[in-house]
Image (cartoon, rainbow, N blue to C red):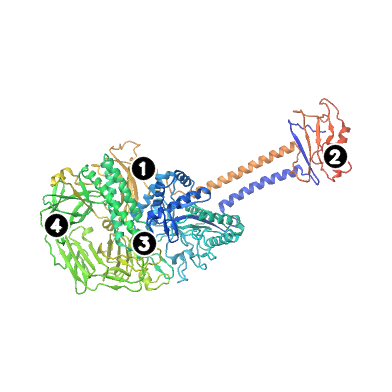
Amino acid sequence: LDLKKKKLKKSRSFIIYKIKKKMITRSTYNKLSCCMVLLTFLLACFAIVHDVYGNPSDDPIEAYGYLIPHTHDDVGWLTTPEKYYSGASMWDGYYSVKVILQTIVKQLEESSIRRFNWQETFYFNKFWQEDATEAEKALIKKFVKEKRFEFVGGGWVCNDEALPTIDAIVSQLSTGHDLLYSIFGDDLEIKSTWQIDPFGHSKTMAMVAQQAGYKYHVLNRVDERLDRQCSQFPNEGYTLGKEKSYQFYWDTTSNDTPIFTHILDHHYSSPEGNYNESLPNGGGYNLKKKDLNFQKHPLISGSTTDLQERAHMLADYIKKRANSMYQTPHILLPFGDDFSFRGDNMFANGDLLIAEINDHPEVYGVKVVYATVSEYFEKVEEADKDQKLIPTKTYDAFMPYANCWGDIDYWTGYYTTFPKYKLQIRDAQRYLHHMNMMHAFGHVLGPSHDVLLDEADAAIEALTRELAIAQHHDAITGTSKAFVRDDYQLRLETAQKVALDASASLMSIILTNSTETTFRYDGTLQITDTSKVHPIVIQNPQLSTRNAIIRLSANRGDVVISMYENDVEVYLTFDAVKRSENNYELFIFVPNVPAMGYRTIFIVPGGQIPDHSTSCRELSNAFYNLAANVTEKRFMLNDKQRSITTMLQTSISVFSGSSGAYLFRPYSKPTTLSDQFDIQHSHCGPLVNEMTIAFTPFFIQTFRLYKVSDPTIGYLFDFDMHSETDFLDVNNEFFVNFHVDSLSNNQLLYSDANSFETIKRPFEAIRYGDDSERSYYAGNVYPMTSHAFIRDTTNQLSLFSYSSFGVASFSDGHLSMMIRRSTSNDDSRGVGEAVVDHGVQRQSFKFSFQAPSNVRMLSALIERPSLPIIIENTQANDKSFYTSSLRHFFNPLSFELDSSILLSFRHLPNHELLLQLFSGSSSPFSFSLSSLFNDAFFQKLSSYSIRPLTAISSSSTPSSSLSVPVSPSRISSVSFSLSRLLPNPSDPSDPSDPDHPTPIPDSSSSFFEFWNLLRFGLFFALAFGITLFLGLVIVGLTVCFKRSSRSRLMSSDNLQRLQIFTREDSYDELDEEEMVEMHVSDDDLSDPLSSSRLSADDDDDDVDKDELEKIAKSMQSSVSQQNSTLIDDQFDVGVVDADDDQFSLM
């Protein structure tokens, strides 16, 4: 054998394959190797392009559907929150939120592809505290960390957006966020709201979401003529569909990045058959029989036809939206409904659909996955990052909400439904605001009273949570069943009483640093001991010193009232208006109540009732003169400051119709009830001028002016309304109307949005082609949370309220407010009950007539009046006791923020104080936090941080500057600690040193651009690495084959193997004469070959060529018999010629 100096390694086997036709040559193999390397690299590059730039044109996937598993669990509606949680039989099944949460945990554990989105923290907290096992808690924490269980909204409830004040919205969100972050810490991310059931949407809510750190904002209930084509007016509306603007960036003009907003195009339920399939939101199938709400239609039958039919339905539903309704092919599909996931049907059937669709992309043309809300939006943003097709919008509001369920109906009745309950909620908010302030100062000034402070902590938290429940979109709206509303009221009343008792203890710490003195908030005085003094603490919830009018009910009016100013006793102006026998209402003017502080006044019996007249027919002070014209049943109003006189007329009108708790559905024009103008009472004294007029025996109005020079008091009328409706037909809705004949507003109305900013509310006589009388009236009622006004270039008539109402301007120069309503029927919107609200109601308002102005600051002063707190101590009878032992004046601020509105001042669980405020004027400003608090009480400000609006992240951002910016369109939120240590201004490590600022990270960096660049680099590196690895493997195999057989083919029926293997351990370089012992065998060759042996000693010089030739001929004979040919370019040694055939032998 001629081995050509080839070196044989230890125990190496050499394998030769021979094929009947032709053996692959080395050059061919090398070419294939190069092709494989090149092909691998091209495939890797294609993968990069496919991932980054989307699907190629021949990809069968046209659109992507993202099923958003969720359940909408009302915190009270048709039954109480407690019954909803533990279990209640309802019209369509058994509801138990506890069972729903247990089911969700179990089903997420069964499959890693499943996701879930949870909203109501009230229910989650109840489950976590009362029923979740340790194993379930561990699983939930695991799912949250894996981003498979996502909290959306994260508030205590899903709040209404028309009626709550901004501080109530922020408080209910913070209540939920605080709880969630205490459980999950940094593993929790709340990225999106989920406002899917409020009856209309406010710009304030979008602004709050923006400033709280949400990235996405999900809405649902907008005027249905905006997001679909209603059959009543098929050629009108459908703006969102035509513009493909269900998704947009909502610019709330708060100087923040506009928030990505999504309006659901059909509802928050699973794709179902509520809509005509011929309309733009239809899916091309009759969804009514086979929709995707597997809670109500639970089974996909075992037949393939049933599964495929639903799969086609869902695929067409997705493609229709991707093609004609959205800017990207990524479609959000709510997968759930009210109290869904009570069993296994939802996920079980969803899994079947997903598998069927994704396994056959060429059939359905879509891909479907479960997703969290944030996962979905991240895909949309990624798809739109280059094209920038999603528009930016500046909507003021999506109100009023209307739907097309037969007639066009407006959801404007609930703005006023059950006004007494709405007022109860707002009164509780005012008390909570006061208690939070006292609680914060109590922790600083009385840290040794641990037990009292702990009790106050618990009581205030309980009231905060009950008020959060009250903001639910079926609570404050008055749209729950009567027994549920009774439960809401009782819960709130109980929590308020406990909190007020705890707050009284806090007041004892601040005022006396003892617990001997008690405090009452009921505003009533029983003066029985003529020698006893009655101290009253007047607390100011504002950020500036203010004058206050205090109203107390007392059993006598012959008193003397005083206070101390710089240790000098000052007697106060007051009035005593007799309401009935032994019943007086005391009106007291208290000057200079310090910002966020209080001062004490003293009432001593034994004086005289102030002189007054009871026959006056004019009300007058430094700003106004209001004269009653009984004959014309109206007033002559003179604005003394501007020397303008006009006619003012008030009236009561009533609508009849088929309204319900939600809807205002009048039959026709209103009827005026003001058929008389009887002056029943008047009082003109040193402080108060008031007149009571009966327009009917059951609707009585009182007008009141205060004779003070402070324009925030004197430039306003008190307007008290007494109404009784037992005598009337129950289908009635009552409006009080103000008409100024010198004011022409062209029916343009302004009202506040959530006590934050004033919104222009245009009057639309025809909406989307609807010119009906119902649309004219019901469609032009808007929510008023705190104030509303009409104006022209010269005059402005402003109305202020203490709770929420519906307001309108039905005709020029008119401002109307719906004050109460009762109905005999349900409006078929779910609650199943009429509005039964009879009896006597007393409501208080204020109004002004002046030049056009911004009333935002004035509205805030009215919204949060100074609060009287009555002090009682059984051991004290004279003033000297209180003046010596009582801190009767508390001014915590060293300077005032005159144009700022205080949103919240409260104590945090980490013992910091939280201050939240915004500007009441149109101009921004800043103030120094370090010098804000009076160093007579607080000696150092430290550890201050700029915080998000809610606790949406578990940490705040340390601030390098003590200058706090305040804007009219942004809420400033800062937390800090007060300590006894004075700062060292020369210490460079002192965080208050402005010369050593700490940079604040920019949270608005271009994250997605960076991520795409990083991802491209990672994919390229991966592709290069795979290519390099495969190349090395191929080169290694090439070397191996070259050193061995120079050819290796996969075995097949056409292959035969000749194996020659060595016996010695190693060899040196061999000469061509050297011999080694060899075993040659092949089952397919002749027996002589397999038994042939060559043997020689290592030292032999000669080779037995005859024997070799003999073996070769035998092999050649065998090959010839099979008509096979071996090509000799395999190697050029050991060639044996036999006839015309050749073969190579190593």
Q: What residue type is labelled 2?
A: Ser
Question: Residue beneath label 1, please?
Answer: 960
Closer to the chain start, of discs 3 and 1, is 3
Of circles 4 and 1, which is in front?
4
Identify the image quadrant of the N terminus.
top right
Question: Residue beneath label 4, please?
Answer: 556
Q: Give coordinates of residue 321: x percent, y percent.
A: 52, 62
Closer to the chain start, of discs 2 and 3, is 3
Q: Give coordinates of residue 536: x percent, y percent.
A: 19, 51
Residue 371 shows in this picture: yes
Question: Residue beneath label 3, please?
Answer: 479
Q: How far apart are marks 4 and 2 (CA)?
A: 135 Å
Labels 4 and 2 touching (C-beta < 8 A): no
Q: Distance between the residues labelled 2 and 3?
A: 98 Å
Q: Distance between the residues labelled 4 and 1?
A: 57 Å
Of circles 3 and 1, which is in front?
3
Closer to the chain start, of discs 4 and 2, is 4
Among the 4 quarters of the image, the one containing residue 1050: top right
Identify the image quadrant of the C terminus.
top right
Q: Which amino acid does label 4 sit on?
A: Arg
Q: Which amino acid does label 1 sit on?
A: Ser
Badge 3 element: loop
Question: Residue beneath label 2, please?
Answer: 1086
